[in-house]
Amino acid sequence: MESKRGLFPRFFFLSDPELLEILSETKDPLRVQPFLKKCFEAIKELEFDDETKIHAMKSEEGERIQYVKIIDPVLAKGNVEEWLKPVEEVMIKSVKDVIDKANLDYSKPNQEREKWVTQWPGQSVLAVSMMKWTSEAEGAMKKSGIAGLEVFYEKQLK
């Protein structure tokens, strides 16, 4: 078990009995679903198709993020850590992709913030909001100092 944990460090979040259960069910990738929450924060489940290929991840709140690349656990030939590594890599790339798209959408002229906030997953809304707030606050300070910040503050209240 320690060698498996060495190959996929997120297995350290699992107890020995949980890890044994995952390793004993290596032929069925769907059997890993109950343990995903312990390995990956905010992932409730992976979305599998009929051929057990992974297309997306879903949160406890029902938010869904489409993967930028399909993952085929069958190619790992029963080594669960060998397909969970790409799950982790594609998860990161997919979240970055969603944040980039949300950022572009936010920048559209006449974009209604209320509509924008409800269209995107929470993590991307938080990330883009923080980036835009920082950028706009810095711009206001560079342009007009304290007076610029006061104008920016009023804009934020609206």
Image (cartoon, rainbow, N blue to C red):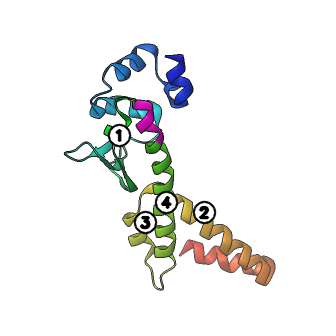
Numbered disc in front, either 3 or 1: 1
Residue at left offset 47%, top offset 68%: 102
Label 1: element kind: helix
Marks 4 and 1, how far apart at CA: 31 Å
Mark 2 residue type:
Met
Label 2: element kind: helix
Query: Which tag, 4 or 1, sits closer to the chain's start?
Result: 1
Mark 1 residue type:
Leu
CB-based contact (under 8 Å), mark 3 and mark 1: no
In the rendered image of this protein, does residue 6 appear above or below residue 143? above
Numbered tag placed on residue 130 in the rendering: 2
Residue highlighted by disc 4: 124
Residue highlighted by disc 3: 117
Residue highlighted by disc 1: 75
Q: Nearer the viewer, residue 99 or 129?
A: 99
Q: Is residue 39 magenta?
A: no
